[in-house]
Each structure stands twice: as structure tokens, then as C-alpha cells.
Amino acid sequence: MMWKWVKGVLAFLLAAGIIAGAGFSYLSGAIHRPLNPQGEPVVFVIMPGAPSASIARELEERRIIKSALYFRIAARLARGENRIKTGEYRIGSHMSPAQILDKFMRGEVVTHRLTIPEGYNNRQIAELLDQSGITPKDEFLTALAGRSCLLTPEGTESLPGLEGCLFPDTYFFPLATPAENVIGTLTNRFRELLLSLLARKPTTPLRLREAIILASLIEMEARVPEEYPIISAVYHNRLRIGMRLECDATIQFLLSSPKEFLLYSDLSIPSPYNTYLHDGLPPGPICNPGLRSLEAALFPSKVDYLYYVVKGDSGAHMFSRTYEGHLQAVEKYRKWLEIKPQGR
């Protein structure tokens, strides 16, 4: 009698083991097998705060996985329910639920190419980030407020604010990148390139902060590559003899929107940035200069020009050493000008 009972228990355990093994085998297959290997890649976005249950449900509804339940079981077994990272993901059709889960846990999000043009100011960069879905404009501008830009590792040179220190370049960011991360990436790139230029022993007599400000003026004035260091020399020469810079770009910086041609009335806008009214450099950069402008500010050409005027729609300039020569150049290219300011 006892033997029959033992045989019954053993038979039950064996059957239960077979069933459990089959169930585990099925679960393992469901987790490690892609649902539609021949399908197209899909983009899947995980919003901040989304629970794993809703993520699994959406994956099932979009037929990326077969079972939300199995996905949640896999997440539980991998202790990954609270390790899924927000962001935008590209999921290939060859990927199994286990591979998808691993991707989510690693945070292998899609990055988007973002090119910041040379000469963009901070507000323009904020607009670009917002339009690209990388960082909301208001969040970015708020994160910029109250910050200063350290120009040397020792902190002996700095600029008030980060205008001029957000380096224009091509970057790759995920959607919804925190503003602090974006700022850190742009300023780190700026310092990296600035240090490489400083290692070449600049020839400018200006302090470093002044050179960065000057670089922003050069960025907005120069168009032809070979003219960057020459325009830098013009401003260096004017500063050396105490002549006002009279830089049109500083006036454009004060306008709500840029003008193709400035008016005489624009030149009288009251502001410390108005280099037609005030001596020396403006109090801060007017944009974020690129590498060519930074290099020109630190390594000006050895020329004695004091004036320049645009020659036409190519963006090239005619340079002059004397005011009389400048007036002749202005007269020659008058059709390209709306105003003929004293100087420049």
C-alpha cells in the first residue's frame, strides 16, 4: 500500500517536473525568439516615469513582442523593472524580447545629429535645441542663467555668462537630453579647442576674455576664410590707438531681428554693446564664435589696416590704411551699402 502511494507521489512529481520544464522551455523560447524577424525596424519611445507594465503593454499592442506578461516576467527575473531608461529606441525586427529589454536597461537610445552654426547666439541655440526635440528652450535658457564661463583651468580668466562659450559644431544627442548635459558638452568642446589654441602661444596682446569677445565680433563680420585674421588685425589696430571699433555686428546684436542694412538711427541705440558710442570692446561676446574666429582673435595678421568695407555679395572686403582710402572704397562699392558710417 505504501509502495503504491510512493509511486503515485513520484509520478506526480515527475509529471509536474515535465510540465514545469515544458513551461520554462516555452517561456525561454518566447523571451529569446523575435516575433517577426522579417519585419521593419520600429522606433519606440519610453517617456519619463513610464512603468514597466505600460511599456510591456505598448510593446505587445504594437506587435513588437508577443506577450506583455512574458516581457514583465523577463524584466522581473533580470531585476530590470526599475532599470529601464527613458528615451527613443530603434528596435530591429531581429531582436528578441530579451534583447529589447537589455537595450532598454543599457539605455542604448537613438541619438540625433545637431549642427550648431558658427555665430549663433545662446537664444538661437535654445531655439534650435527646442525645434530638434533635444531640450526645451525655456529649460535651456533657465540652465544658462547665472552661469559664468571659466576660460582657464585655474579660473583666473572668465566671462560673465556662457555667451561665447557654447562651441558651434556637430553633435549627437538623444531626444529629451537634460539642459545641463547639453551645456556641459558644448562648453567642454569649447575649452578643449581653446586649450589647443593657447598651446600655440597666441600673439594677441589682449587678455583671454577680451580675445573671446573679439572673436565673436570677427565671427559676425568675416565671410571669406583668408580675411578672418585681417579683420582681427583691423580691430587690434583700432584698440591699440584708442579708436572706436564701430562694428556693425554689435548693432545687429541689439536689434530684435537682424537687418540687411543698418540705418543711421540704429547707430545711436543706447547700450554698452554699441561700439559706435563706446570705446573698446563690448562687455561680453555677441555670439558663439567658431574655431576660425577664435584662431584669428588670438593670431591676428601683421597688417596696418584700420578700415574695411564689403565689396559685394561675395562677402569679401576692401581694406584701407587711411580714412581717405576708406572713403574711396566706400564710394566704389556704394551700391552695396545702405549707409556710409564714419569709420569701419
Image (cartoon, rainbow, N blue to C red):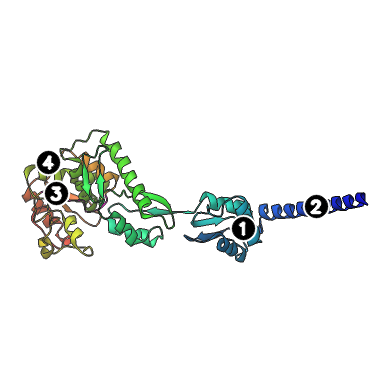
Residue drawn 79% across and 51% down? 17
Sort mark 1 into few (<14), some (14-19) or many (20+) by Cα contacts within 10 Å: many
Sort mark 3 into few (<14), some (14-19) or many (20+) by Cα contacts within 10 Å: many
Quick check: 85 left or right of 65? left
Return the residue at label 1: 72
Q: Is residue 65 magenta?
A: no
Q: Earlier in the sequence, mark 4 or mark 1?
A: 1
Return the residue at label 4: 304
Q: Describe the element under mark 1 as helix, strand or loop.
A: helix
Q: Earlier in the sequence, mark 1 or mark 3?
A: 1
Whether residue 30 is visible to the viewer of this picture, yes or no, is yes
Residue type at numbered disc 1: Arg
Q: Are marks 1 and 2 in contact (CB under 8 Å)?
A: no
Sort mark 4 into few (<14), some (14-19) or many (20+) by Cα contacts within 10 Å: some
Q: Which mark is residue 148?
A: none
Mark 4 or 3: the one toward you: 3
Q: Nearer the viewer, residue 205 or 208?
A: 208
Q: CA distance from mark 2 to mark 3?
A: 84 Å
Magenta range: 280-288
Residue type at numbered disc 2: Ile
Q: Earlier in the sequence, mark 4 or mark 3?
A: 3
Q: CA distance from mark 4 to mark 1?
A: 73 Å
